[in-house]
Image: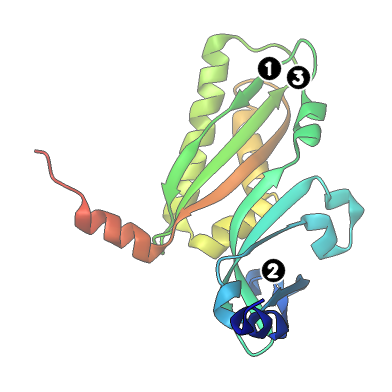
Amino acid sequence: MSDRSVSKQSQEKNWYTVLAPEAFGRDELGETPAEEAEQVIGRTIETTLGDLRGNAGDNDTKLTFKVNDVGSDSAYTEFVKHELTRDYVRSLVRRGSSKVAAYVTVLTTDDYRLQIQPVAFTTKKADASQEQAIRRTMIDMVEQSAEDHDFEEIIDSVVEGRLSSAIYGEAKTIYPLRRVEVQKATLEARPAEVAAEEETSVDVE
């Protein structure tokens, strides 16, 4: 074995406490080892809303965070995804009813690009025009919410259920609904990335 291999193996790894974003109370998400602080950047960690809140009733919501900054012994993260478990979504489907989903890509007031996927479950089977109207309402309300709120406000609205409740209140006037959820919310691009895309886009007109 070479001296270089021995030297590399003998290096002690440091442990970094991974913390949730400030919007999630800087709660501890776990620990991760690395020889150099730079190696921690970009690592992702998954948890559940139930683990963060100490409430097993919220374990159907998965959250993914990515390390974007490292201190002396702490790793700080940003939100990248909110997603309901497949089992939970499947449990909401009822025979003889409709599941109406939408996929909406929006830009927040502080230029974060998100894809948000609301889903509505009707009490009985809706016809095609009613499903289309519900989907249009969901899209419009997600887009309006993004026009009025910044990134942290939107994510808080998704996690706390305010966005889904607002959609439910509006869409139930089209056809009786049993439930509305945001099935997934994903960070697609940060402000710097959005700006870079705009600079490199080609005007074909």
User: Which residue shows up at 78% across the image and 27% down it?
Assistant: 90
* CA–CA distance in space, label 2 to label 3: 34 Å
* CA–CA distance in space, label 1 to label 2: 34 Å
136 sits to left or right of 131? left
Foreground mark, 1 or 2, reads: 2
User: Which residue shows up at 52% across the image and 12% down it?
Assistant: 129
The disc, 2 or 3, on the residue closer to the chain's N-terminal end is 2
Residue extending farthest to the bottom is 72
**Label 2 sits on what residue type?**
Phe
* CA–CA distance in space, label 1 to label 3: 8 Å
SS type, badge 2: helix
State the residue position of label 2.
24
SS type, badge 1: loop
Query: Is residue 183 visible in this depiction of the protein?
Result: yes
Is residue 141 or residue 154 the one in the foreground? Answer: 154
**Label 1 sits on what residue type?**
Ser
* Whole-percent x, y for residue 83 in the image: 67, 45
Residue extending farthest to the front is 1
Determine which quarter of the picture holds residue 182.
top right
Foreground mark, 2 or 3, reads: 2
On residue 189, the disc is: none
* Whole-percent x, y for residue 136 in the image: 48, 28
State the residue position of label 3.
123
User: Which residue shows up at 70% across the image and 11% down it?
Assistant: 125
Is residue 48 or residue 154 the one in the foreground? Answer: 48
Q: Residues within 10 Å of mark 3 (few under 14, many from 20)?
A: some
Residue extending farthest to the left is 205
Determine which quarter of the picture holds residue 189.
bottom left
State the residue position of label 1.
98
Q: Are marks 2 and 3 in contact (CB under 8 Å)?
A: no
From this view, report whether residue 96 is shown above or below residue 12: above
Q: Quadrant of the N terminus?
A: bottom right
